[in-house]
Amino acid sequence: MPAQGAQAGGWDCRKNRDKLGQLEGMLRRKGGATIPQIAKALHWQLHSVRGAIAGSLKKKLGLTVVTEKVADGTRVYRIAG
């Protein structure tokens, strides 16, 4: 029998929640975070970061994520409020 919280294929929802918590923490920082910074910190692909922001944070949790383009042309994401 698999460990509690684990599903078929070795995916563990507890680990996913921890990473989403890290993502939320990075976006709550005063300076926010860029997609590449988040991807490196969480060991995720770039498209996974964008999907987590749009799906888990915006749609499921109802958080307002704002983005701004800084002087060097990169986009910085942060949670408003």
Image (spheres, rainbow, N blue to C red):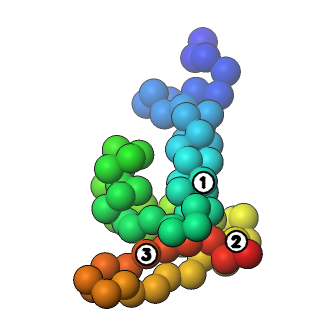
Q: Which mark is residue 63?
A: 2
Determine the CA span between mark 3 and mark 1: 14 Å
- Contact? badges 2 and 1 (CB < 8 Å): no
Which label lies toward us, 2 or 1? 1
Tell me the crowding category of disc 3: few under 14, some 14 to 19, or many 20 or more residues within 10 angstroms, Cα based.
Answer: some
**SS at circle 2:** loop
- Contact? badges 3 and 1 (CB < 8 Å): no
Residue 15 visible somewhere in the drawing: yes
**SS at circle 1:** helix
Q: Quadrant of residue 24?
A: bottom right
In the rendered view of the protein, which quadrant contains the C terminus?
bottom right
Question: What residue occupies the far top of the structure in this picture?
Answer: 1
Determine the CA span between mark 3 and mark 2: 16 Å
**Residue under the image location 72 percent in, 64 percent down:** 61
Q: Which mark is residue 25?
A: 1
The residue pinned by badge 3 equals: 76
**Residue under the image location 37 percent in, 84 percent down:** 70
- Contact? badges 3 and 2 (CB < 8 Å): no
In the rendered view of the protein, which quadrant contains the N terminus?
top right
Q: Nearer the viewer, residue 60 or 39?
A: 39
Tell me the crowding category of disc 1: few under 14, some 14 to 19, or many 20 or more residues within 10 angstroms, Cα based.
Answer: some
Mark closest to the chain's N terminus, 3 or 2: 2
Q: Nearer the viewer, residue 35 or 72?
A: 72
Does 51 sit left or right of 29 as displayed?
left
Mark closest to the chain's N terminus, 3 or 1: 1
**SS at circle 3:** strand
Residue type marked 1:
Gly
Q: Please, is residue 28 above or below residue 70 in the view?
A: above
